[in-house]
Image (cartoon, rainbow, N blue to C red):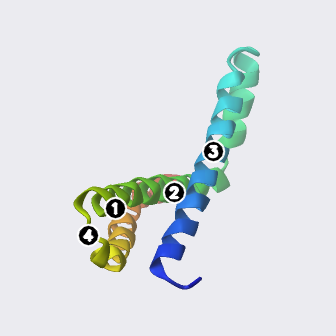
């Protein structure tokens, strides 16, 4: 049961959802620096400009892409009643997500290495 594609999709969807909520909190912290003045905002932006955060942006991209593509997969399964293709659609979701993350992550990585 715990190795089925449905369970793996469930866990990945929950993990990416939690990652997106954590990013939202970080985003609100940075934007909240605007109310504290330009100096506080610039300090927070300098802190987030470190190379490790550039790499974490690729992780954010992966979370957003997988979460979105998996949502489309769920809509297809639900509205078109193609439950017999759930496993194939899960693997298609992984492949499409990987292609999109590589395509979007390479420019981020190249920019981070400059």
Sequence-wise first label, 2 or 4: 2
Q: Which residue is mark 4?
A: 82
- Residue lying at 58% horizontally and 48% vertically, measured from the top left: 20
Q: Which residue is mark 3?
A: 21
Q: In this rendered view, identify the residue nearer to me: 86 or 113.
A: 86
Q: Secondary structure at mark 2?
A: helix
- Give the spatial CA distance, label 3 vs label 4: 30 Å
Q: Nearer the viewer, mark 1 or mark 3?
A: 1
Sequence-wise first label, 3 or 4: 3
Q: Which residue is mark 1?
A: 73
Q: In this rendered view, identify the residue nearer to me: 101 or 24.
A: 24
- Residue lying at 53% horizontally and 75% vertically, measured from the top left: 8
Q: Nearer the viewer, mark 2 or mark 4?
A: 4
Sequence-wise first label, 1 or 4: 1
Counting from the top left corner in percent of width and height, residue 12 is at 54, 66
Name the image quarter holding residue 25: top right
Specify whether residue 114 is in view. no
- Give the spatial CA distance, label 1 vs label 4: 10 Å
- Give the spatial CA distance, label 2 vs label 1: 15 Å
Specify whether residue 85 is in view. yes
Sequence-wise first label, 2 or 1: 2
- Up-down: is 58 above or below 8? above
- Give the spatial CA distance, label 2 vs label 4: 25 Å
- Give the spatial CA distance, label 1 vs label 3: 21 Å
């Amino acid at each position: 049961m715990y190795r089925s594609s449905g369970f793996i999709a469930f866990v990945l969807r929950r993990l990416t959802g939690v990652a997106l909520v954590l990013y939202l909190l970080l985003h609100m912290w940075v934007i909240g620096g605007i109310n504290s003045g330009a100096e506080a905002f610039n300090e927070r932006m300098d802190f987030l400009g470190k190379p490790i955060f550039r790499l974490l942006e690729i992780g954010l991209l992966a979370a957003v892409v997988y979460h979105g593509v998996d949502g489309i997969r769920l809509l297809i399964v639900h509205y078109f009643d193609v439950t017999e293709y759930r496993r194939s659609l899960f693997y298609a979701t992984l492949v499409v997500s990987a292609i999109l993350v590589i395509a979007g992550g390479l420019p981020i990585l190249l920019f981070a290495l400059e």
